[in-house]
Image: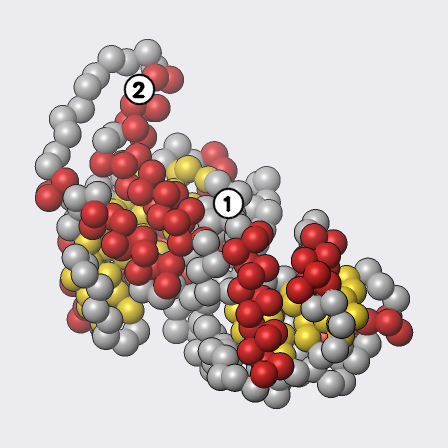
Amino acid sequence: MKIVVHIKGEAEQWREALADAFPEATVLTSDACAEERKNADYLAVWKPPEHLLREQTQLKAMINLGAGVDYLLRTPGRPKEVPIAKLRDAGMSELMADYVLYGVLHFYRSFDRYAAQQANAQWQPHPVEEKSQWPVGVLGLGAIGAHVAETLSQAGFPVSGWSRSPKRIEGVNCLHGDDGLENILSQAKTLITLLPDTTETRGIINAKRLGQLPQGASLINPGRGTLVDENALLKTLDASEGLRGAMLDVFPEEPLPADNPLWRHPKVTITPHMSAPTPLHDAIDQVIAYIRDFEAGKSVTTVDPENGY
């Protein structure tokens, strides 16, 4: 069995861990010469180069070393018949819940306003609303989105979640379909986007939907950069009755170009795609389990390329 690993900055750690788990296998990083890395049985990759995919002729599976598979699905040379498994949570949900809870509290407790006041040496306390009066909407109820929604509910916020198909999560008002989306948008004081990148979700947060949010609402996007129409977001932030603010962790182009106006917008907080870094040991354990299941002929949950997740 041959396994080839590609992930920037961490490939050798992955190679060592997989070699320990499969001592009978040849485990290489993509830095090996082309002749050595050809004919792999498994690719364990994050944002692989096109040539690495085109070199392979006998793949049993590819394992995406992250939750988002949009880059891999779009990579030319991807063998369409080869199944793709992806990391599902692998410890990321707790980190994402921390990030989102901080973001909700940032707006709920007026820290955005206090930061602006500090710049002007302005002393002005703001009243604190009851949490019950601060509805939160979570778009996307996969493994990570469901955990985020549960965490916010346990923190005392009324939470509504939206997904493509019906879901049931304790403490969360689960909605689906166009009517469900409009219901959430009309109420959410903070909207969180954790949807996958698909043809249906790209640009889902556009001018129309931003306009459906209550005046003074806030947006948190740690999901996919393609979910939000940046031009529409900027116009809504600039409107007198528009959004109060946005916290953004992901962007269509990363790193975010220095000349992008989001960097300097007073209502925007930017973080560099760090909301939920994958805990290495949890992720390695999941990949090892995937390979063992594939080798044993067991059923493995794989990505549906048509749906994008």
Of 189 and 142, the residue lying toward us: 142
Q: How many marks?
A: 2
SS state under label 1: loop
Q: Amino acid at mark 1?
A: Met
Label number found at residue 117: 2
- Measuring 59% from the left and 47% from the top, which residue is drawn there? 255
Q: Position of residue 166 (x, y in %)?
A: 23, 74
Looking at the picture, how far across and down is residue 170, in whole percent? 18, 61
In this view of the protein, which residue sits in the foreground, 199 or 137? 137
**Nearer-the-camera pick, 208 or 98:** 98
Say which residue label 1 marks: 274
Quadrant where the N terminus lies? bottom right
Q: Quadrant of residue 239?
A: top left
Q: Are marks 2 and 1 in contact (CB under 8 Å)?
A: no
Q: CA distance from mark 2 to mark 1?
A: 27 Å
Q: Is residue 210 above or below residue 48?
A: above
Question: In the picture provided, is 113 more to the left or to the right than 15?
Answer: left
Amino acid at dot 2: Gln
Residue at image position (37%, 17%) is 119
Residue 157 visible at all = yes
